[in-house]
Image (cartoon, grey):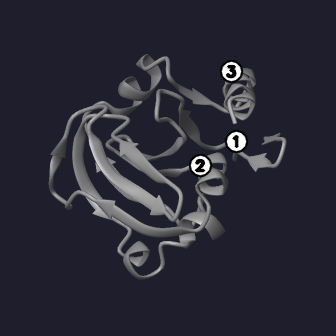
Amino acid sequence: MKVDDYSFPIDLFYLIREPGHIWIKKISAEEIKIGIDDYASKRAGDIEFVRTIKEGQRVRKDQIIGTYESGKWIGQLKAPIAGIISQKNEELRSNPGLLNTDPYGEGWILCIEGTDVETQLIEDKEIIPVGEKLEEYIRWRISQE
């Protein structure tokens, strides 16, 4: 889906709770992969640094689990589900610009293992698939610029 200059792949879910702009891909019944969406990637400018918590660390839903920084922006990353950080993208340490050049691919940030991931995703009304609600949210964000 395209909203103005921003792209949102249809096979992902999106967190719209502030600070929002996190995409979520279900990897298995117990694991998700997350990153920042195209809107956040473009609005942040050239991302120079990504910081995340360590693998193996237990996280609560909505806990701050990292930041991404550019010369004009510090964005927070919040856990969309409760679980354990199972993997982090080590490539971002030397190449944080992947968040700009490939936010939905090589620019992924973390994987989280949790219990009953499907239920956690479905029951959260602020984790949504591509569609009208996402478009309304992005258009609202654009109007706030």
Say if mark 1 contacts mark 3, CB within 8 Å. Answer: no
Q: Nearer the viewer, mark 3 or mark 2?
A: 2
Crowd around label 2: few <14 · some 14–19 · many ≥20 (10 Å): some
| 143, 88: nearer the viewer | 143
Picture disc at residue 52? none
Residue for badge 2: 40
Point out the residue furthest to the front here: 72
Element marked by disc 1:
loop
Q: Of label 1 and label 3, which has the lower sequence position?
A: 1
* Residue 26 placement (x, y as % from top left): 46, 44
Identify the residue at image location x=43%, y=28%: 121
The kind of residue on which mark 3 rests is: Lys
* Residue 37 placement (x, y as % from top left): 59, 48
The kind of residue on which mark 2 rests is: Ala
* Residue 6 placement (x, y as % from top left): 76, 47
Q: Is residue 67 visible?
A: yes
Q: Is residue 76 left or right of residue 52?
A: right
Identify the residue at image location x=84%, y=42%: 4
Identify the residue at image location x=32%, y=53%: 66
Q: Of label 2 and label 1, which has the lower sequence position?
A: 1
The kind of residue on which mark 1 rests is: Ile
| Quadrant where the image shows the C terminus | top right
Distance from label 2 to label 1 (Cα)? 17 Å
Q: Of label 3 and label 2, which has the lower sequence position?
A: 2
Crowd around label 1: few <14 · some 14–19 · many ≥20 (10 Å): few
Picture disc at residue 133? 3
Q: Is residue 113 visible?
A: no
Element marked by disc 3:
helix
Residue for badge 1: 10
